[in-house]
Amino acid sequence: MKILVCISHVPDTTSKINFTEGDSKFDTNGVNFVINPNDEFGLTRAMWFKEKQGASVDVVNVGGAETEPTLRKALAIGADNAIRVDTPATDGFQVAKQLAKVAKEGEYDLIIAGRESIDYNGGMVPGMLAALLDANFINTCISLEVEGDKATAIREIDGGKETLTASLPLVIGGQKGLVEESDLKIPNMRGIMQARKKPLNVVAAEEVSTQTEAVKFKKPAPKGDVKLVDPENLDELIDLLHNEAKAI
Amino acid sequence: MSVLVYTETEDGKFKKAAFEVASYAKEVAGGDDVVAVSFNAADASELGQYGVSKVLNIQNDKLSKFNAEAYADALKQAAEKEGSKIVVVSQSANSKYLAPLLAVHLNAGYASNVMAAPESTDPFTVKRSAFTNKAFNFTKITTDVKIVGLSQNAFGLKENQGDATLEDFSPELKKGDFSVNVESVDKAKDKVTIADAEIVVSGGRGLKGPENWGMIEEMAEILGAATACSKPVSDMGWRPHSEHVGQTGKPVASNLYIAVGISGAIQHLAGINAAKTKVVINNDPEAPFFKAADYGVVGDAFEIVPKLNEKLKEFKAKNA
């Protein structure tokens, strides 16, 4: 089985979110970048397929040279090859188009992407990629098994879950549950050394017009201080929730 | 020109999100028509109250279970038939599943997580949440056909007295529409889901064990709320994964979020930031949640919650 895992290069959760150039661009100054957590669950599941069932695992990212350490980390975790499509990621459609070209050329059986990136939270790329490839698609996937060319997946729905089957080629929008947090691998020294020698191919981007454009960013107004209520006076809490917040 | 909306149903009944996307579409449409697409609705005329003037009423047993590809195909055919330039969907799990497929089929730009009515319609610019609610991203959609994914509870319901005409609609479904097959659905009946809930009551590690969730469930029942939990709680198997809210779990956008025994790790807060009013009950006054909350009670949850439940019951009895 040939697996492609799409990797987003995102600021880690604890990053300070600031904007520059007249609030039109995310300020990467001092920000630590990581593999998007939703992608990392998928990558770890891909490694499981490689170890238990035999599979090759390639990772791909759409971005500038600054994203290469993130791809190297994916190689250190155990991916075989990395591909970087050399263009800044601008919108979900543009990224999906670039990925579709890589996916078509590589003739992958299974493509795993995170259900969304933790920076822009668009949640578009996996579905758009599937539609562009005319491949089957399962989103918010929390369990995935593959036997031959048949996949069985569990998808999280509002208030429960759903079991689905589909044949390969298949695109997955993955999340926690594909593997558990405790299954995530921290690259060891051997992995890091090997990763340096593994191929990281830089490919030229396709000419793609975007469909959306981020024109401005804004941070929410700072929140006021918490109002503390005495545990002996819970009537006050109910009064505040009813009359002030109008929440009950 | 018309604005098309995907009005979601559950067991034939419209979800609140259906009325919310209709209300939003009415505002965006101005004087133009709002056309809804409904799948196996028992009474599609209900949509008239929220500004829908026409319903493309699909009755088809093959579509009794949600199927992203088939539903996206039906919506595509509806949008083309109506010549709709704007399509509005919610951000439920199902809508988030089908919207990117629909976007490619319609060659439409798609903006997800939309928080309000458009900032402007020419150019078409919407306010979206990004960076897990730590910022807003104002996005311009530049394509001819546009898809808006409206976040739950972001716009609210707006009643519009009007009648919706029903038109039978039978989209042509292809074999490929069903190539992902739904084998089984495992869903708690008669339980409010986190996505639909006005109020979410959530418990954390401070509750010490799954056996202590009775008081959380009681509060949820009194308030008609959904129950949720923090990540460690679902990791330890005290509660199902589907209740986990936070960055890698479910997002919360309810009107009220009550956190009991949750310290407020940054990943947790990222997922619940969009809740309008946040209450924390925790015995540690230094817990980070107090910085994110609107109201807080410092003290022992095992004493406070049962007392609060009694008082909430009295309040509900008086205000019923």
Image (spheres, grey):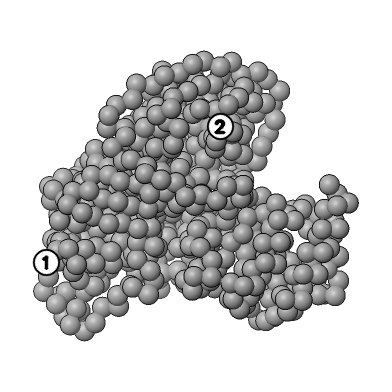
Q: Residue at x 26, y 50 (%)?
A: A151
Chain for disc number 1:
A
Residue situated in front as seen by the camera: B122 or A181: A181
**Residue B33: x, y in percent?**
56, 20
Mark 2 nearby-residue class (10 Å; few <14, some 14–19, many ≥20): some
Residue under label 1, please give it: A199
Residue in view at x 62 percent, y 47 percent: B190
Residue A47 numbered tag = none
Using the rendered image, report if marks 1 and 2 lie on a common chain: no
Identify the residue shown where x is 26% and y is 78%: A187
Q: Position of residue B178 (x, y in %)?
A: 32, 34
> Position of A192 compared to A22: left or right?
left
Looking at the picture, how far across and down is residue B68, in whole percent? 38, 38
Where is residue A141, by image quadrant?
bottom left
In the rendered image of this protein, does residue B148 appear above or below residue B75? Answer: below
Q: CA distance from mark 1 to mark 2?
A: 53 Å
> In the image, is B15 to the left or to the right of A177?
right
| Disc marking residue B12 | 2
Give the quarter of the image for residue A34. Answer: bottom left
Q: Identify residue type, mark 1.
A: Pro
Q: Is residue B36 visible?
A: yes
The location of residue B105, given as percent across then percent down, is: 33, 32
Tag 2: residue type? Gly
Question: Which of the two residues, B174 or A30, is positioned nearer the viewer here?
Answer: B174
